[in-house]
Amino acid sequence: MCLIGSFLVLKNKLQNVLTILNPKLFAPHLPSKNLTTFMKTKLLKKLLPLILVFAVSSCTKNATEEITTLDRTLLTNYDYSIEETQLAQKINDYRVSQGKDTLIMVNHISCKSKEHNDYMIFKNKISHDNFTERAQNLMDVLGAYKVGENLAYNFSCPTTVLNAWLNSPGHKANLDGDYTHFGISISICPSTGKKYYTNMFMKK
């Protein structure tokens, strides 16, 4: 069985939280004596997800976890396989055929893609788990403000996986998307021999 998945995120400037910090802008109808209670309640609702993300991100890394936004090291070395190079070329050839600019390969993005492949192999599943953290990492380290991701599992070669992505509206939207850079990793599960694909896109 072959599987694919796609995801997209835009940079979040936390405007909602900033609005809550000035409750008169958010709820001018409230009496002044109720604003303190209103602010506390709203801030708790807004900040709780951020606290939870930080708690997850700050755990010690091990084989079951991916490097998160707290690790802002620029990764510069990636040893591309023949198939990874072929897939990158096929994606750019497709974009040119559609009148779009080619994408620039970035080793850091490929390293993050490889980390996610390793995670999926360890978990024995294909998923976009921790995509928010990967996207935030590209925003922090590379200055991205738009990030997308295509995944695939158990496809035999770059041609078959690209055809599958092109036949899926969500994946095709990433391939056609307004991006400037990308990275690719293809990893093989040592116990099953199945291939895992992660292809991340960004615009900066």
Image (cartoon, grey):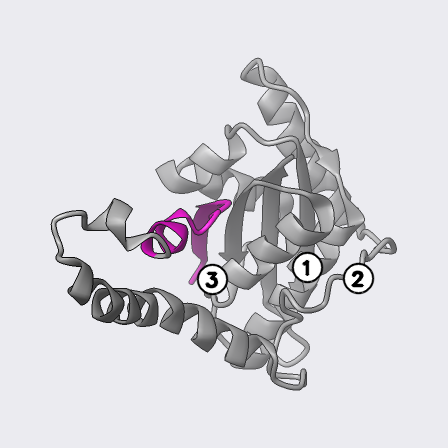
Which disc is residue 4 wearing?
none
Q: Quadrant of the C terminus?
A: top right
In-front residue for pair 57/98? 57
Q: Earlier in the sequence, mark 1 or mark 3?
A: 1
Segment tinted magenta in the rendering = 1-20
Quadrant of the image occupied by residue 33: bottom left
Q: Does 86 sit above or below residue 33? A: above
Q: CA distance from mark 1 to mark 3?
A: 13 Å
First of labels 3, 2 by sequence position = 2
Q: In the displayed image of the protein, which residue is found farthest to the top?
A: 99
Task: Please give the name of the residue rendered at 87% of the width and 56% of the height, measured from the top-left corner.
Answer: 77
Foreground of the two, 73 or 34: 34
Quadrant hosting residue 103: top right
Residue 91 appears in the rendering: yes
Residue at the disc numbered 2: 73
Marks 3 and 2, how far apart at CA: 22 Å
Amino acid bearing label 3: His
* Residue matched to label 1: 112
Label 3 environment density (alpha carbons within 10 Å; few <14, some 14–19, many ≥20)? some
**Quarter-of-image position of residue 198:** bottom right
Helix, strand or loop status at disc 2: loop
- Could you tell me residue 9's position as x and y percent? 46, 47
- Callout in the foreground (3, 2): 2
Q: Residue at x 51, y 30 (%)?
A: 177
Question: Secondary structure beneath disc 1?
Answer: helix
Find out whether residue 39 is within the magenta segment: no
Q: Among all residues in the image, which is located at the extreme front? A: 33
Callout 2 amino acid: Thr
Q: Is residue 151 left or right of residue 107?
A: left
Q: Is residue 181 above or below residue 115?
A: above
In the rendering, which numbered label is found on residue 128? 3
